[in-house]
Amino acid sequence: MRKGLCMAVTVLASILVLFLGTLASAEDAKGVTKDTIKLGVIIDMTGPVTPMTIPLVQATRNYIRHINEQGGINGRKIKLIIEDDHYTIPGAIAGFKKLVFRDGILSILYGGGTGQTMALASQIKKERVPVITVSLAESLVNPVRRHVFIPAASYDDEVECIFDYIIKILNAKNPRIAFTYPDTEHGKTGLRAAKERAKFYNIEMVAEEIVGLNILEATSQVLSLKRAKADYVIAHSGVGQAIILLRDARKFDYKPTFIGDYYTCGEDLIKVAGKAAEKFIGVHSFNSWYDNKPGVADMREITLKYQPDTKIQTKFYTQGWVTSMIFVEAAKRAGKDLNGDSLVDALESLKDFDTKGLCGLITYSPTQHKPNQFSQFYKTDLDKAIFVPITGWLKPLEKK
């Protein structure tokens, strides 16, 4: 009897070890099976920034579909699970919890906006979930967070490039520069960068105006900018806010040089603002749908296979395409033993990854989770409703 009891205990212990080992393996490979990779998306699908975010989702769907039709990643097909955060922090938190604890995803793309990703930072670290963000805030990756990556040059880089462009390329003497921004974390990030760059050039901005996400007119802001005699206005906002700003400036015969960064540089601005956008200059970290670079041609060809009626996509579509490319390349490099940590290691191994003209070369490392500092300046072509590049890829001048 004693011998039988010992044997039973031994068998039970063996089963327990096997069970715990299976649990550990499942935990190590969360979101990964022998034939599937679960990839989560947190993004605004119905809220105030959908002109920018809907194209990102379309690009991700099309690129992932293309990869799956090519056999997937090391024999595994990607399953996309999309959560709408309505561009709110509570929405992003709810989406994160569902994706991580109910759906058991491997990784997340986008993660909501700047404020949303910052709010999720501690949970991202705790749950060890790799995230490639939609936000390009420098604060997300400086200092480095092991599981957070941005897909392009930061907002800081673009704002710095705008100051460099005004002073070094346009050769403006004693420029009177003003800054407009929404009262959000994204807006405050840009304002901090602008103040630092103004200090770098030993100048003071003549005005700072809040242009909210839900404004219907910008009369007071335009009149304030006009009183300040700003001859350069940096528009750090979304497309909708930039359109209203441009239209109201034209209404009051105010003609500074408007230079908009990332989220203002969308083709919808030209279509809707019309003549008011005639002298608008934009800066962006991704290339245009209609450019002639090989990577852009591939993106068009694959997209038109799935959406043959597509006439044009914005640069935000390109961002979604590149973000998806980054994830897929890293997942391939991680090999068969794909899990959260091996995915991070693979991302950190990317060096001069070439998207063939969709953006600048992409390099990450354990001490650098921003891939580059490159952006490009564009002018508007009203007749074709497109942005025409007026520089090559530029990065901010080094601070001395």
Image: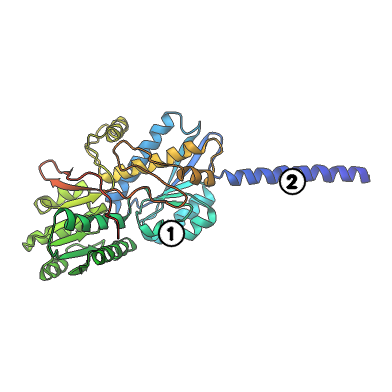
Mark drawn on residue 16: 2
**Residue type at tag 2:** Leu
Q: Which is nearer the eye, 203 or 254?
A: 203
Q: Secondary structure at mark 1?
A: loop
What is the three-letter code of the residue carrying label 1?
Answer: Pro
- The image position of residue 313, as x and y in percent, is 25, 41
* Local SS, label 2: helix
Task: List x then y, in percent, for residue 247.
Answer: 12, 58
Which label belongs to residue 143?
A: 1
The x, y position of residue 187, in whole percent, is 29, 62
Residue 104 located left or right of residue 66 = right
Q: Mark 1 or mark 2, which is nearer to you?
A: 1
Judging depth in this view, the residue of 349 and 398 nearest the camera is 398
Q: 232 or 59: nearer the eye?
A: 232
What is the quadrant of residue 258 in the picture? bottom left
Residue sticking out furthest to the front: 400
The answer to which image quadrant residue 155 occupies is bottom left
Query: Alpha-carbon neighbours of circle 2 within 10 Å: few (<14), some, or many (≥20)?
Result: few
